[in-house]
Image: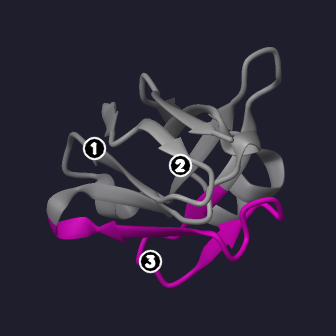
Amino acid sequence: QVQLVESGGGLVQAGGSLRLSCVASGRTFSSKPMGWFRQALGKAREFVAAISRSGESTYYADSVKGRFTISRDNAKNTVYLQMKSLKPEDTAVYYCAADSSTARAMAVTGTYDYWGQGTQVTVSS
């Protein structure tokens, strides 16, 4: 069982930056690919970014490529999402996720085994 707790969300103006953090419980963090998903009001949850167990491979949705960066610190059981050049359409609840397969699978299938409670990101125009 993996428990995930996100933090770092908030209100920011368009063009601004935020960094989300997700702390995972348990000793299996380094064995799991991690990812971020988001869900805007009235829309389906969508894939944002994923990172492999070692951190060597990363995957991004086209909508955030070049603006968002996913990273992880296995010593701290933490995964991050650095978000820059934020746009109003980035407004959503952001969820941290962990999976038992691969980061590429998370990106392609949009599925995962564990997720956190989410953190709200609001970008004003």
Percent x, y of residue 22: 33, 46
Q: Which mark is residue 55?
A: 3
Q: 1 or 111: nearer the eye?
A: 111
Residue span colored magenta: 49-75
The residue identified by callout 1 is 24
Please tell me whether mark 2 sits on a helix, a strand or a loop. loop
Residue at 65% from the left image edge and 37% from the top image edge: 38
Q: Is residue 11 above or below residue 101?
A: above
| Color theme of the render | one colour
Crowd rating for badge 3 (residues with CA inside 10 Å; few <14, some 14–19, many 20+): some
The quadrant of the picture occupied by the N terminus is top left
**Residue 112 visible in the displayed image:** no
Location of the C terminus by quadrant is top right
Mark carried by residue 100: 2
Instruction: Look at 26% across and 45% down and name the residue there.
Output: 23
Instruction: State which tag comes first along the sequence, 3 or 1.
Output: 1
3D distance between C-alphas at marks 1 and 2: 14 Å
From the viewer's perspective, is residue 41 above or below residue 106? above
Residue at the farthest bottom position = 56
* Quadrant housing residue 53: bottom left
Horizontal and vertical percent position of residue 71: 42, 70
The amino acid beneath tag 2 is Ser
